[in-house]
Image (spheres, grey):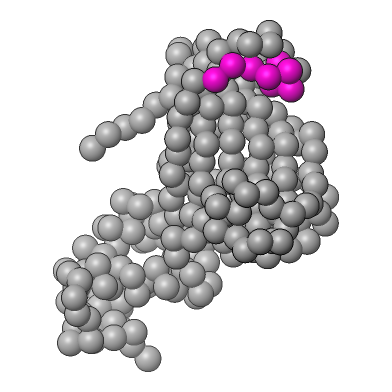
Amino acid sequence: MADAGEAGFAYKPLYVQVRDSLVRRLIEGRWQPGQLIPSEIELAREVGVSQGTIRKALDAMTAENLLVRRQGRGTYVAEPEDGRMLFQFFRLTPDRGERAFPTSQVSDLSRSRANKAEREALELEDGSEVWRISRSRALEARPLISESITLPLIRFPDFDRLEAVPNNVYLLYSQRWRVTIARAVEKLKAVTASPDDAAALGCNKGAPLLEIKRIALDLEGRPVELRVSRCLTDHVHYLSELR
């Protein structure tokens, strides 16, 4: 059954409405990460719009890193381990050398009621519980980040049953809980190292750090992760590509 015909879309540009309709397939799990999606011709016939409209909708989803086009093979649902996806959400880059993804080591995983800041960031009700993950991250074997991650328990049940928390948690969210991180909002601030930061990063207490506070949102725009990363920047920089 087709999602809708051209006459069924209104108020927004047609390709945006089609894009929203196709994103709904990701949200509902009808299209899975790594899956080859139907061709433009097939989608145009199914949705009931022109092939050009489908192409514009797929272009928009590709620009958002939701889809990946592979020459001669077709268009696939992006996976969080795809190179472009990794660096969409990791912006620290060595001053010398190529970009690389850091390794991680979890030091603590706990469950408790969300505090006020967590409730506000994750839009949770009073009394809601969260998972708190503390980990350190290294790049080129050098300590780089002291990091805390807060997740709403209601979206990530049984998180504590994992044998280990993997380095790429966004891939974990997608595969185990069908939570796809679509975008993130970050705030950057200069701070100084606390005693815990100093222990994790091997730096002096009071050393200058870059704090990155991130709220990650799913495909429906709901906040699902609060992350605070406190970073040494003596050998890396934060890279932002503006268009």
Q: Is residue 26 above or below residue 148?
A: below
Answer yes or no: is residue 73 visible.
Answer: no
Q: Which residues are magenta?
A: 191-198
Answer yes or no: is residue 32 visible.
Answer: yes
Q: Position of residue 56 (x, y in %)?
A: 21, 63
Q: Is residue 50 magenta?
A: no
Q: Residue at 45% across / 14% down in the picture?
A: 95
Q: Residue at 46% across / 12% down in the picture?
A: 96
Q: Position of residue 142 (x, y in %)?
A: 65, 16
Q: Residue at 61% across / 10% down in the picture?
A: 207
Q: Residue at 30% across / 76% down in the picture?
A: 43
Q: Position of residue 160 (x, y in %)?
A: 81, 54
Q: Is residue 45 above or below residue 1?
A: above
Horizontal arrangement in the rendering, residue 188 relative to residue 41 (left or right) = right
Q: Is residue 24 above or below residue 164?
A: below
Residue that extends furthest to the bottom in the rendered view of this protein: 1
Horizontal arrangement in the rendering, residue 151 relative to residue 47 (left or right) = right
